[in-house]
Image (cartoon, rainbow, N blue to C red):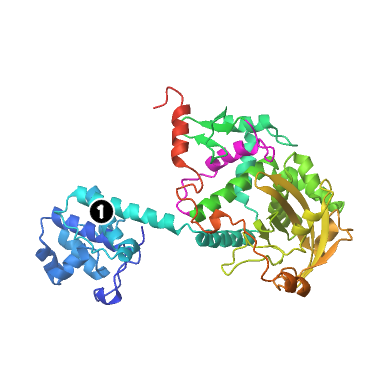
């Protein structure tokens, strides 16, 4: 809580206005400190200000802001300058503690709890102030955790997706970080090998350790104190073995600290995934591959995947980073679970994703006629699936593939408006569908004959995700068991570690 405490308009002294940058609490404590060092009483200061002692006290307690003219009188009385009084640091550690408690008591936590603030005076013990501040901080933390509900997560997702759209999903500062690290380890082109990734870790001061007892809630654990990255002994068949290593030190490169809230957690995850992809598909080389493919009018996610030996999903993600910035192509991306719900989505091409009233897309059902759904009905899982879909907002072409994970099957789709399909392989596809969603008559309403036959006779048991009804896991890193992680690090720390 660092905002300046502003006094109500009717509490300001007449005359010229107080400096706009002044922090009333810090200013008041600096005036009190200067007065005491000068050996003046509150009455002495009040006479110098030509004000009542109660008004002088209000200034020292940060409840009133003096005008610049009054501030000059105060500075003259205590034997210092106006500039010295306006310095933005508290005059002592005790004053800093008092200010922190005052700010806490004027904040939303105390207001919400209806607690009467204590009077912070010179006689209040430091231990008492620290106890009040610690209790406030703990209650504030619990409030933040309680706020990490599915609704808050969906709002955060919607806000983050809007930021990504505004930037065309391209972040030059992360591209620069990736290039700097690749240059540092002598990368010259082509797929980034596992050896190159290991050299990156070594360059950053980390050693790699494969263990069989990695905490169940983690993909990797980084010991920043001892410069170690712990990885699972067995790699998942659905994940690139290089990704956990890159993600582990990507957070270090991005300067991430423990997330303060769920929005922080989401943003850090996006930055980590972006930097990981930028290291696996370096910008210069990926743009060269894509540029050549555009000239031949044969852009393909499969070709991009194969050129850098990455997963289809990683290639599709990376394409969205580079397509608009370097190729001038608007694009959309979807990852959809076999149940028909959106897991991830991005667009800057005008396609309208299904969403809820909060504007959140994740978890929303996808039209059965979209490529991301029809691909599940294709028998040939080894070939890409291409389809045109006519919608109210225009016609969009998509290419889609099925990928398997422990949670089931997912479709990963990349699409563009009809005007830009001429650059892609698969544009000749005869597959076409029409989507009128969110009109329920499109694909979510049974035929009259079926409805008449089964209405009131069917009682399905829904497989409802527990997260739909419960708050998100609490803690700095949602979904991670901190106790398990700390115990793991303690058991694996080198003997010399303190």
Position of residue 219 relative to residue 139, above or below, is above
- In the rendered image, residue 202 lying in the magenta stretch gets the answer no
Main SS class of the magenta portion in the image: loop
Position of residue 178 relative to residue 18, above or below, is above
Q: Position of residue 96 (x, y in %)?
A: 26, 52
371 relative to 172 in the view: left or right: right
Q: Position of residue 224 (x, y in %)?
A: 48, 35
Which quarter of the rendering shows the N terminus?
A: bottom left
**The image quarter in which residue 423 lies:** bottom right
Q: Position of residue 434 (x, y in %)?
A: 80, 68
How many residues crowd around disc 1 within 10 Å: few (fewer than 14), some, or many (20 or more)? some
**The image quarter in which residue 286 lies:** top right
Give the residues in magenta.
234-261
Query: Is residue 90 visible in the rendered structure shown here?
Result: no
Which quarter of the rendering shows the C terminus?
A: top left
421 relative to 119 in the view: left or right: right
Q: Position of residue 117 (x, y in %)?
A: 23, 62
420 relative to 229 in the view: left or right: right
The residue nearer to you, when weighing 86 against 342, is 342
Please report the residue visible at 18 percent of the width from the left and 56 percent of the height from the top. Answer: 34
Q: Which residue is mark 1?
A: 132
**The image quarter in which residue 15 lies:** bottom left
- In the rendered image, residue 246 lying in the magenta stretch gets the answer yes
Q: Which residue in the rendered view is the most extreme toward the top?
A: 495
270 relative to 376 in the view: left or right: left
Q: Which residue in the rendered view is the most extreme toward the front?
A: 457
């Amino acid at each position: 809580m660092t905002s300046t405490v502003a006094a109500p308009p009717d509490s300001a002294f007449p005359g010229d206005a107080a400096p706009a940058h002044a922090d009333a609490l810090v200013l008041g404590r600096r005036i009190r400190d200067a007065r005491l060092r000068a050996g003046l009483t509150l009455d002495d200061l009040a006479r110098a200000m030509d004000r009542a002692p109660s008004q002088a006290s209000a200034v020292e307690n940060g409840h009133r802001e003096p005008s610049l003219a009054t501030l000059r009188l105060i500075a003259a009385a205590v034997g210092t300058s106006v500039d010295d009084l306006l310095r933005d640091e508290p005059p002592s550690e005790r004053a800093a503690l008092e200010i922190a408690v005052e700010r806490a008591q004027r904040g939303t936590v105390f207001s919400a709890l209806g607690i009467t603030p204590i009077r912070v005076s010179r006689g209040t013990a430091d231990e008492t102030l620290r106890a009040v501040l610690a209790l406030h901080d703990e209650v504030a933390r619990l409030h933040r955790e309680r706020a990490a509900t599915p609704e808050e997560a969906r709002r955060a997702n919607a806000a983050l997706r809007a930021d990504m759209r505004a930037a065309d999903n391209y972040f030059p500062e992360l591209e620069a970080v990736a290039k700097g690290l690749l240059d540092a380890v002598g990368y010259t082109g082509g797929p980034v090998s596992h050896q190159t990734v290991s050299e990156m870790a070594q360059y950053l001061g980390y050693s790699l350790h494969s263990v069989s007892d990695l905490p169940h809630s983690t993909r990797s654990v980084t010991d920043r104190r001892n410069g170690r990255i712990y990885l699972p002994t067995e790699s998942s068949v659905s994940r690139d073995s290089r990704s956990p290593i890159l993600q582990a030190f990507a957070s270090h490169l991005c300067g991430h600290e423990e997330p303060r809230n769920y929005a922080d957690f989401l943003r850090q995850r996006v930055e980590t995934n972006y930097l990981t992809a930028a290291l696996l598909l370096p910008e210069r080389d990926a743009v060269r591959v894509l540029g050549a493919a555009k000239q031949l009018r044969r852009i393909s996610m499969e070709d991009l995947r194969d050129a850098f030996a990455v997963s289809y999903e990683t290639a599709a993600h990376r394409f969205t980073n580079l397509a608009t910035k370097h190729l001038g192509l608007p694009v959309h991306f979807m990852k959809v679970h076999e149940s028909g719900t959106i897991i991830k989505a991005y667009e800057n091409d005008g396609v309208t994703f299904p969403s809820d009233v909060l504007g959140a897309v994740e978890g929303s059902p996808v039209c059965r006629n979209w490529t991301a759904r029809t691909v599940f009905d294709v028998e040939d899982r080894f070939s890409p699936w291409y389809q045109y879909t006519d919608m109210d907002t225009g016609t969009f072409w998509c290419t889609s593939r099925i990928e398997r994970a422990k949670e089931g099957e997912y479709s990963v789709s990349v699409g563009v408006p009809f005007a830009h399909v001429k650059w892609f392989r698969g544009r000749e596809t005869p597959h076409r569908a029409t989507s009128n969603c969110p009109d329920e008559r499109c694909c979510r309403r049974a035929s009259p004959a079926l409805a008449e036959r089964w209405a009131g006779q069917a009682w399905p048991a829904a497989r409802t995700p527990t997260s739909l009804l419960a708050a998100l896991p609490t803690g700095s890193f949602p979904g991670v068991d901190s106790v398990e992680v700390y115990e793991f690090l303690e058991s694996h720390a080198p003997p010399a570690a303190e």
